[in-house]
Image: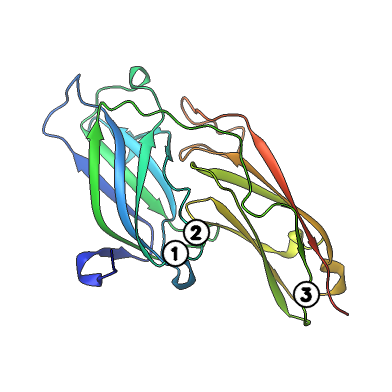
Amino acid sequence: MDFESNDFMGWNRSFDLEFSFESQSQDLFLTRVDIYYYNNPSGGYGLPDIRTGISTTGTEDSYTNVVSTFIDNSEVSQSDDNVQMLSLIILTPQNFLFLYQFFRLQFIFSSSFAATQTFISEMKFFTNTDTSFPAVPIVFMSPNQTLQPDTVQSSLTLSCTVDNNGTFAWTWTGPGVSDGDIKAADTTRTSILMLSNISAADAGDYTCSASYLAFGDSLDPSNIVFNSIKPDMNTTNNISLTLSS
């Protein structure tokens, strides 16, 4: 599908989408949301951080977070330039949820995400459809890289991408990490380390680590989200950077 701006709604700042049902029902629980959006990383188009919540009244302070993740984003990449469809699934079991009439999606732009604008053409909602989270071991698309730029550069970008569905948390270690800028891309499947003011001290071994992190989870152990569900897997990848003198 080609991108036609007239067929999309676009945002370049954080926004909420709130949906209400006519009445509460013991038999109605949203379990999957299909999002059709334009993905062009070089132009900053993509999806930012996402939060899902439910409420009985719809007031700002009444929402309870529910944990969710993507199940079919393994094909999203930094080279895409087309419309993607991703399925956001709810991981919090129905028996842990209360009856609700309002459902909210929060799209949060921040310096931690590479996407600076989001264009959505369509959303589809599914209820009471059991969907499991494919928690398979994390595999990197380009493991154990060696980078040796031909020329001296003032800035460099290192990146790691996992060949998995889901959403992910990332950490980096290495000589230039403390002064670098880290961003998530490809619906968190890619982590980008941007290095500037390059010097000889930035050469050496870098390690990126990926672990499953459902939307709605928190990286802060003291702020555990209600009924967080994620497999305890952590995988590392190494990048050796050699700089020309």
Q: Earlier in the sequence, mark 1 or mark 3?
A: 1
Q: Return the residue at label 1.
A: 80
Say whether residue 174 is left or right of residue 54: right
Q: Return the residue at label 2.
A: 77
Cα separation, mark 2 vs mark 1, equals: 6 Å
> Looking at the picture, how far across and down is residue 109, in whole percent?
44, 58
Image vertical order of residue 5 relative to residue 191, above or below: below
Q: Amino acid at mark 3?
A: Ile
Q: Return the residue at label 3.
A: 198
Q: Residue at x 73, y 80 (%)?
A: 154
Cα separation, mark 3 vs mark 2, equals: 27 Å
User: In the displayed image of the protein, which residue is found farthest to the bottom?
Assistant: 151
Image vertical order of residue 95 relative to residue 144, above or below: above
- The quadrant in which the N terminus is found is bottom left
Say whether residue 198 is left or right of residue 159: right
Query: SS of the residue at dot 2?
Result: loop
